Image (spheres, rainbow, N blue to C red):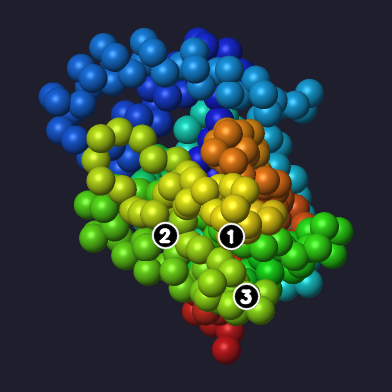
Amino acid sequence: MNTGSPAAPSTPAVRSYLREFLSDRHVVALAPALWLPILHGIILRVRPARSARRYRRIWTEAGSPLVVGTQHLAEALATSLEGLAPGTPVVAAMRYGRPSIAEGLAELRAAGVRRVVAVPLFPQTCAATTGSVLEAVTAAAERLEPPMPVTSVTRYHEHAAYLRAVAAGVTKQWELLGRPAHTLISFHGIPLAHDRRDGYAAQCRATAEAVAHLLGLSSHEWTLTYQSRFGANRWLAPTTLEVLTALATRHRPGSDAVGRVDIVTPGFAVDCLETLDELGTEAREHFRRRGGGELNVVPCLGDDPAHADALAQIVWAQVSPDINQMTGRR
C-alpha cells in the first residue's frame, strides 16, 4: 500500500485528492473546527491548480508514476514470494484515491484469500503514513462479511536486505556517473510534534547512517535532510533546500567547490511527485539558481528485483510466525 495520487493531473482531480488527503486527522492533527475552514476556504481554492501543474510535469501515458510504480512493485513482490509462499496474490492499494484499499480487499476476497498481510511501503514508520494506512485497511477488512484478519508489516528501516538494496541502487548510479562530491539522504519531513510521538527521526537517522556506512561515505561526505515541508508548524530539520543552499554557496567561484551533489531517498519505495518533481525539478533549479552545479536524484528502487526480494524477506520474517501458529506448524 502507498499514499496515493490524483486520478488525473487536472485541477478538479487534484482538489478531490487533496480534500481526502488533508482531511485525514493523522496528516493534519488540528481540531476540525479550526482546520476545515482553512482547508475548504483557502487551501482547496489555491493549492490544486499549482499542484496540478506539478503533476503534469511527471505524468506518463500509463498514468501516475506512484500508482503505476506501486503496481509494478506488487507484481515483482508476488514473483519474489513464490519461493516462500507459492501462489500468494499481491495487489496494490492506495490510502487516498484509487485503486482503493476496499477495492484491493475485494480482489483478494474474490481470489479466495481468508487473511491479508498489509504492507505499507514506508520503511520508517509514523502515524501520518503507516498509522493512517493500517487504520484504514483494518477498518475496511472488518467491514467485510465475514471480516478478514489483518497482519501488518512495519518498521523495516534497519532490515539488512532493504539497506543493501538501497545501497546497491546508489552504487548502480555511481558506476555510470562516478561518485559525487556530496550526498544528501533525504526523507519526507513531519512536524516536530508528530516526531515526539512516533520516533520517526531516529528511524531516519538509523537508515541514513547504515546506508552511508554501506556506501563507504565519511561523515563530511553526506548529510541527512528532510523535504516536503508545508504549513507554519515547526518540522524536522535541516530541510533539503536549506542544505542545498549552503552547498551552492560553497560552490561559488572563490569558495570551496563541492562539485556534483546526489540525493538518495530511502523513505520512498517508488518514484513520485516528491522525488521526480520536488527534487528532480524544483530542488535542482533551486540549487542552480544559488550557484550550485550538477544535482542528480538517484531513482527509487521501484520494482528492482533486489527491492522485491528484500520486501519478500521482510514480509515472510514478520508473518510466518503467525502463519505457523494458525496452522499448527513448527
Q: Residues within 10 Å of mark 2 (few under 14, many from 20)?
A: many
Q: CA distance from mark 1 to mark 3?
A: 19 Å
Among the 4 quarters of the image, the one containing residue 81: bottom right
Pointer 1 or 3: first along the chain: 3
Q: Which residue is mark 3?
A: 217
Depicted 287 relative to depicted 98: above or below? below
Q: Residue furthest right?
A: 176
Residue 256 disc label: 1
Q: Is residue 7 left or right of residue 63?
A: left
**Amino acid type of disc 2?**
Thr
Label number found at residue 125: 2
Rendered-image quadrant of the C terminus: bottom right
Tag nearer the camera, 2 or 3? 3
Element at label 3: loop
Task: Describe the element under mark 1 as helix, strand or loop.
Answer: loop
Side of 104 relative to 47 (left or right): right
> Which residue: 86% across, 59% down?
176
SS for callout 2: loop
Q: Amino acid at mark 1?
A: Asp
